[in-house]
Amino acid sequence: MKIRRALLSVTDKDGIVELAQTLHRFGCELISTGGTGKVLGEAGLPVTDISHVTGTPEAFGGRMKTISFAIESAILFDREKDAQEAQRLGISPIDVVVCNLYPFTQARDAGAPMETLIENIDIGGPTMIRAAAKNYKHVAVVTDPADYPAIIEELGTHDGALSLGTRVRLMGKAFNTTADYDAAIAQAMDEQNGNTSLRLGFSDGKKLRYGENWHQEASLFRQRGVTGSLFDMDVLSGKELSFNNIVDIAGAVEAVQDLCPHGCAVIKHTNPCGLSECPDQRRGFELAWAGDPVSAFGSVIAFNSVLQKETVEFLNLAAAERSARKFVEVVIAPEVAPDALAYLRQHEALRVIRFDPGKLRSDREIRVLGGACLVQKADDRLFDKLECVTEAAPSDGLAPGSPLVSLLEFGLKAVRQIKSNTIVIVRRLDEHTVQLLGMGAGQPNRVVSAKLALDRAVANLRDEYQGAPAGVEQYVRDQLGAAILVSDAFFPFPDTVELASNAGVNTVFQPGGSVRDEAVIRRANELGIAMVMTGVRHFKH
């Protein structure tokens, strides 16, 4: 469709001159409103002021500019059915509408008062956009400056014409633009009226192979308006991602976000079964894997630094014996060194994902359940206090930045990512290296989680021991004595403390807040255990 007449009315002037110059080059008449017309005129382009089309001036401080019978008719009339009527009424068609809207969301996000918000509600713009989108068979509508370069190229290639395919694509984008705009206004006005609401938009849906199970259909969508989305993962190699892969990837990425300098998470069924923080990426991977080597089979592995070949060689993918290779489903990192990617591609099915964990941060969490929506502030606080409540105190002290406190912070970051009820055992190997030694998760009661975490820690310590057989039990107790136990919630009974003491753990951290705190503290004193309360619970359901 040849573009002979264009209406340009934009708040965001970026790129508008270049687009208008291209339209003009192909003989298109340019109609424009005040601010946009001024920019185009200063660029030396001939512009027809919109008042010459409407027959009325701008009025009421700019509230009335484009809304008129002449403008909306020129956009809306059906070129095939209504041509004679339009001619009789003196209506000349407008073939393209280039419009973006008043910056309502920017004003809202800046905390503008109600009066300013009201003045940033665009009326004429959405009217023109919706009219043009409705009549996409005969009119192109452009709402996003990011689309200008492609449109300029298409106009140049097709002698000033735009295809139906382009008009259909732009129509869909236009209706999403006005929907998002109206949703933002409605939500802000609800807030002004004390009626909290939430409107979310998702687009670009793509079907997955299947859902959690083979008989379930599933799709992945991008949330509109967010700056970071798992939808934008860059799959560098391997099979198509599954529903479960994506859920685990989310957990893996979140688990390494706050670790440094090299964090590694081994995720199985959304829980970190291995986690480490280490100056050496390869060693960190080995430590995370050692957290639960059996569960690491078929896991999702995340790193928060550029992935190196030396690190991924730990998977032993080049081994002649298949049984000697470590099988994982997905490897994620913010960047992958070329030789590391080449090595990983030896396993054709292994998904290698480039994604920066820092892009997934959000200040709130949203979950849709049974026709309702839960929204909460993100769990971004580790502890409120460090109060030793027992006669025995941690030998290293609780000074901010001390080795013990930084180990606790690592433990809390682990607890925060694991399904409750959660118990973790974490230890420090050197000044900058810490490891998740054992974890218990998702149990109906805390004492079972504690038993699982301690059993896993004991098994790992026995596996790593290299001395004389007679010394293994003492080695395990010594290592657990230097480790700490961290709980995501309070101890309702003394049983978890008793289990920890029997295994050799000397220091436990919990938020406190149980009606039985005194009984738990009393038992810890009897056992000689140091107990510190943090004041912050970390349930994850």
Image (tube, grey):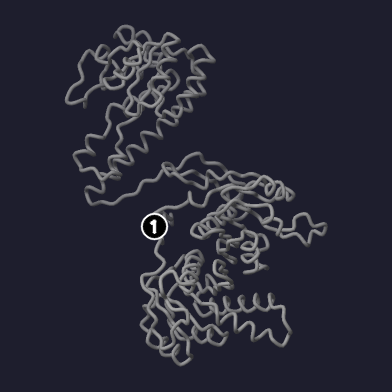
Residue at the right extreme of this rendering: 320
Residue 201 shown left or right of residue 159 in the figure:
left
Residue 79: name its quadrant.
Answer: top left
Picture coordinates of residue 184, whole percent (x, y): 32, 41
For disc 1, the marked residue is: 374
Picture coordinates of residue 2, whole percent (x, y): 46, 12
Residue 25 makes an appearance in the image: yes
Q: Residues within 10 Å of mark 1 (few under 14, many from 20)?
A: few
Residue 225: name its quadrant.
Answer: top left
Question: Which residue sits at x=39%, y=19%?
Answer: 17
Above-or-below relation of 528 to 430: below
Question: Which residue sits at x=42%, y=76%?
Answer: 398
Residue 338 shown left or right of residue 432 in the figure:
right
Nearest the eye: 486 or 171: 486
Picture coordinates of residue 468, whole percent (x, y): 74, 84
Nearest the eye: 426 or 67: 426
Question: Which residue sits at x=27%, y=12%?
Answer: 53
Residue 80 makes an appearance in the image: no
Above-or-below relation of 72 to 270: above
Picture coordinates of residue 204, whole percent (x, y): 50, 39
Above-or-below relation of 122 to 85: below
Nearest the eye: 334 or 374: 334
* Element marked by disc 1: strand
Q: How many marks?
A: 1
Nearest the eye: 200 or 22: 22
Above-or-below relation of 371 to 79: below
Residue at the front extreme of this rendering: 431
What type is the residue that disc 1 sits on? Leu
